[in-house]
Image: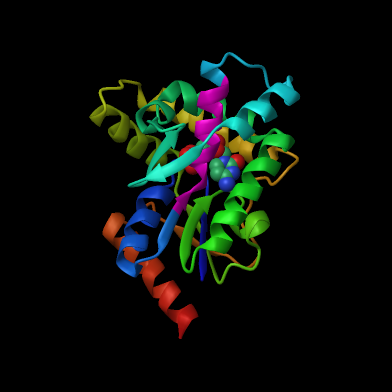
Amino acid sequence: MIIAIDGPAASGKSTIAKLISKKLEFEYLDTGALYRGVTYFIYINDLSLNNEDMVVDLIKKTKFSFNNNHLFINGNNVETEIRKNNISKLVSAVASTQYIRTILTEIERKIGHQAKNIIMDGRDIGTVVFPDAEVKIFLTASTRVRASRRYNELLKKNEIHTIEEIERDIIKRDEIDSKRATAPLVKSYDAIEVNTDNLNIEGVVEVILSIINKKIV
Ligand code: DC
């Protein structure tokens, strides 16, 4: 069974998907981490996206793996680096690049087909990667609520930014993600939208579990 959770930046998809995967004993794939990992690797290797052959070659030679929900690149834990604000600022441009999406979509489908039960979060899981997913959730929240959650998250990691700066970045990212030509961020016609403005984490998990239970019965 495949459960797809899509939605805009900082809507809490990963936090929620992780908790639900634990409760249901499903595998979990954070597809945003793959886009972040590729962005980070292009960045540290000082490559340009215009140089398609070199970038494709590099990605194909690189081993991306997960351990305890942390992304490893060629055996190195890069979880901290890929969550930094500089990578968040760069990732939308990388995710708008057709040849990168083709490679990552292929990887995501392979992981999905190999798993018995999996929950995947991203932007295009219910629309492009697994349009036949049994359960599709579209998680949203206002930009201010998302910015303030991300602010607190970064603060815990000693990354200090103003809420206004984070909100501006989120708006910019949503705009690039929604307007790109390939696999834009859009709610699938058959996804159920869950707005989390007035819900805490436990509340969101409860709502989504009840949606999943209704689908299973
Ligand atoms: O969910 P996140 O913020 O970690 O995602 C990082 C970026 O990757 C985001 O700007 C959009 C992109 N992304 C995507 O285009 N498609 C996905 N399936 C997952 C993420």
Q: Residue at x 27, y 60 (%)?
A: 202
Residue 9 seen in the current view: no
Point out the quarter of the image occupied by ligand 1.
top right
| Magenta stretch: dominant secondary structure | helix
Report the residue that reaches farthest toward the bottom: 217
Residue 39 lies in the magenta stretch: yes
Q: Position of residue 147 (x, y in %)?
A: 40, 35
Q: Residue at x 49, y 79 (%)?
A: 215
Q: Quadrant of residue 21?
A: bottom left
Q: Residue at x 40, y 65 (%)?
A: 26
Q: How many marks?
A: 0
Q: Quadrant of residue 104?
A: top right
Determine whether, in the image, residue 191 is placed left or right of residue 160: right
Q: Is residue 132 above or below residue 40?
A: below
Of residue 35 and residue 107, the one placed in the foreground of this image is: 107
Of residue 12 and residue 172, the one placed in the foreground of this image is: 12
Q: Is residue 138 above or below residue 93?
A: below
Of residue 40 and residue 55, the one placed in the foreground of this image is: 55
Of residue 38 and residue 88, the one placed in the foreground of this image is: 38
Q: Position of residue 10 (x, y in %)?
A: 43, 41
Q: Identify the image's colour scheme: rainbow, by chain, secondary structure or one colour.
A: rainbow
Q: Position of residue 9 (x, y in %)?
A: 49, 40
Residue 31 seen in the current view: yes
Q: Is residue 82 above or below residue 204?
A: above
Determine whether, in the image, residue 155 is placed left or right of residue 92: left
Residue range highlighted in magenta: 29-42
Q: Is residue 209 above or below residue 151?
A: below
Q: Residue at x 25, y 23 (%)?
A: 158
Q: Position of residue 132 (x, y in %)?
A: 64, 68
Q: Quarter holding the C terminus?
A: bottom left
Residue 95 lies in the magenta stretch: no
Determine whether, in the image, residue 161 is placed left or right of residue 31: left
